[in-house]
Image (cartoon, rainbow, N blue to C red):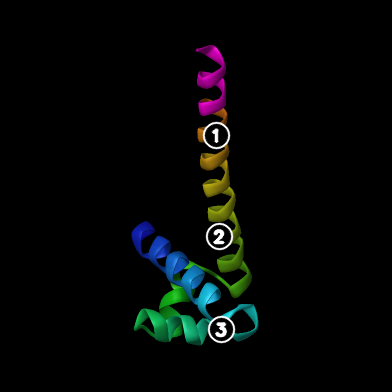
Amino acid sequence: SDLRAREIVAVARQLLEDEGLDSFSMRRLADRLGVRAPVIYKHFASKSALMAALISVGFEEQAVLFEAKLEREILGSET
């Protein structure tokens, strides 16, 4: 499900933040999730696909922050 995929991405992000890219593996991620690695591959075809999802989420978060800042600046300049 989409919810499970988002959970996998969130836990993968935390694992990367905690241990770094060199220590990251699908098996370590599965351990952190409390599942077996094949569960992850049901949602992401490869480690590269998971990394692409992580990058996409990062861009989405940056876009939201950028939009909020832009709105504050526009509203601030109109007063």
Q: Relative to 43, does residue 66 appear above or below in the rendering? A: above
First in sequence, mark 2 or 3: give its number: 3
Q: Residue at x 49, y 72 (%)?
A: 12
Quarter of the image where the N terminus is located: bottom left
Residue under label 1, please give it. Answer: 69
Q: Residue at x 38, y 65 (%)?
A: 7
Q: Separation of disc 3 and disc 1 at Cα?
A: 36 Å
Q: Nearer the viewer, residue 2 or 28?
A: 28
Mark 1: which secondary structure?
A: helix
Q: Which residues are magenta?
A: 72-79
Residue under label 2, please give it. Answer: 53
Q: Relative to 63, does residue 70 appear above or below in the rendering? A: above
Mark 2: which secondary structure?
A: helix
Label number found at residue 25: 3
Q: Separation of disc 2 and disc 3 at Cα?
A: 15 Å
By secondary structure, the bulk of the magenta-drawn segment is best described as: helix
